Amino acid sequence: MVPLHWCMLWLLLPLSSRTQKLPTRDEELFQMQIRDKAFFHDSSVIPDGAEISSYLFRDTPKRYFFVVEEDNTPLSVTVTPCDAPLAWTLSLQELPEEASGEGSGDPEPLAQQKQQIINEEGAELFSYKGNDVEYFISSSSPSGLYQLELLSTEKDTHFKVYATTTPESDQPYPELPYDPRVDVTSLGCTTVTLAWKPSPTASLLKQPIQYCVVINKEHNFKSLCAVEAKLSADDAFMMAPKPGLDFSPFDFAHFGFASDNSGKEHSFLTKPSPKLGRHAYSRPKVDIQKICIGNKNIFTVSDLKPDTQYYFDVFVANSNSNMSTAYVGTFARTKEEAKQKTVELKDGKVTDVFVKRKGAKFLRFAPISSHQKVTLFIHSCLDAVQIQVRRDGKLLLSQNVEGIRQFQLRGKPKAKYLIRLKGNKKGASMLKILATTRPSKQSFPSLPEDTRIKAFDKLRTCSSATVAWLGTQERNKFCIYKKEVDDNYSEDQKKREQNQCLGPDTRKKSEKVLCKYFHSQNLHKAVTTETIKGLQPGKSYLLDVYVTGHGGHSVKYQSKVVKTRKFC
């Protein structure tokens, strides 16, 4: 039995008028062959003007053939490695004149043809080894039988081959601009903006194209099929063909003779191999992302990790044929996150904190002496903030704070407390914060749990309003202020316009009503009332109560709007 590749050569030679003709650029025949893809699926025939995909076993060369029938014919051959480097060689084997089918009309015996081919080694035209998309192109090629031999020495892999005798009119691969580089135009901690010049294929040739951006942490890619190979987590894309079906459905019976599987030379087609099971090709998922963005030539990649190097590739693909070309990729390291400065809190001292919109601030409290508990006093002056407190790394507290809040934390000898304040989306936040292990000596005044001002509707008159608020067991100074406002003055306006941390020293003297001291050991009786006189009929007034502690710091109760009666 003769070796398989000699059989392939023999069947490729036009031995008689009844022999199957190779795919050519005859348009009608070409379209028929394209529709009947099974005709050249994984066969050794390369069709003219169509890209084929095939599989290559490691250390097992594979040969493809095609015929150039006339001298001075343009020729272009492109080989695209997927997932592994390839070594490939293109050579020319002149067609034997006796095999032209002319003359006697009788084909030579097979043994005589084979011997003639063996004696003529053929001329090597081009060779390459690597994982680049490489091509051979000639504006004037001689007629003859061309052989493409491919080999992978690293692992089993896929590859693609495209050959054409009309390269000028085909232009199957999208063109790159004169500057094919991908540029990084903006770099942040978690974002990178990429830009590239548009492909002439869309603007000049009016062909539909789309760009695909690929992001990974390992290396740049030379082809889109290499990306697809990596993306296939279960390796459906890289699954090897079954032994024995390497050339299926290429059936020798189509060429007028039956195949003989009895010889030793064909045993590799039917002999099962334990190395070819699907499990041999399984790989873990890789950290790679492919995003196709249409015909835009600028794109911002988001959700990246700070201080991390990424590789970026852009591919332009023909939307009709899916054939693609790679731009020159680039790489960049995202910026490192700015290290947060940690503010040290002193025991019993008030600290003012400003937090940017959606920003964060870190504070540290490390009591010098042994303690049983820590009192944390927070006054959010503007919008609400989120607070997290960790003691030696353990989360103790996580809450949203609006207005005035006080927290009691269980202490621990030599413990250190880390406080994280995070602003909200609405706007910047201002806070006053105090941490102490000695609540009796704190700078802030003690506050009741309820800091609202209550207005008594039945006691309203045309010129006065009566209000009440809660106090504490500790004697403090309370001052009440009034301010006339419009009738449509809302709670939202009140919150938006007033910084609740501002003290009475920011108010006009004419707005002051009175100041007084009060307290009660019985918290149920720690209530005071006050009637505010000298008001105008049918007017709205904003009332504020400030409590001032021994350290001179003031805290404002929740503001209250009251309206006097219009008719009495």
Image (spheres, rainbow, N blue to C red):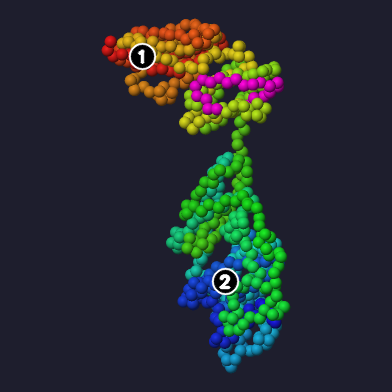
Q: Is 384 rendered above or below residue 236?
A: above
Tell me how many marks there are.
2
Q: Name the residue under label 2.
A: 41
Please provide the residue range marked out in magenta: 399-418
Main SS of the magenta part reads strand
Secondary structure beneath disc 2?
loop
Q: Nearer the viewer, residue 305 or 476?
A: 476
Q: What residue type is labelled 1?
A: Asp
Q: In which quadrant of the rendered image does the N terminus lie?
A: bottom right
What residue appears at the point 70 percent right and 21 percent down from the top-left corner? Answer: 413
Residue 120 visible in the picture: no
Q: Name the residue under label 1.
A: 457
Lateral position of residue 450 relative to residue 487, left or right: right
Quadrant for residue 326, please give it.
bottom right
What residue appears at the point 53 percent right and 22 percent down from the top-left corner? Answer: 431
Q: Which amino acid does label 2 sit on?
A: His
What residue appears at the point 48 percent right and 60 percent down from the top-left corner? Answer: 319
**Circle nearer the viewer, 2 or 1:** 1
Q: Is 549 rendered above or below residue 328?
A: above
Label 2 or label 1, whichever comes before in sequence order: 2
Q: Position of residue 289 (x, y in %)?
A: 57, 51
Q: Position of residue 397 (x, y in %)?
A: 59, 27
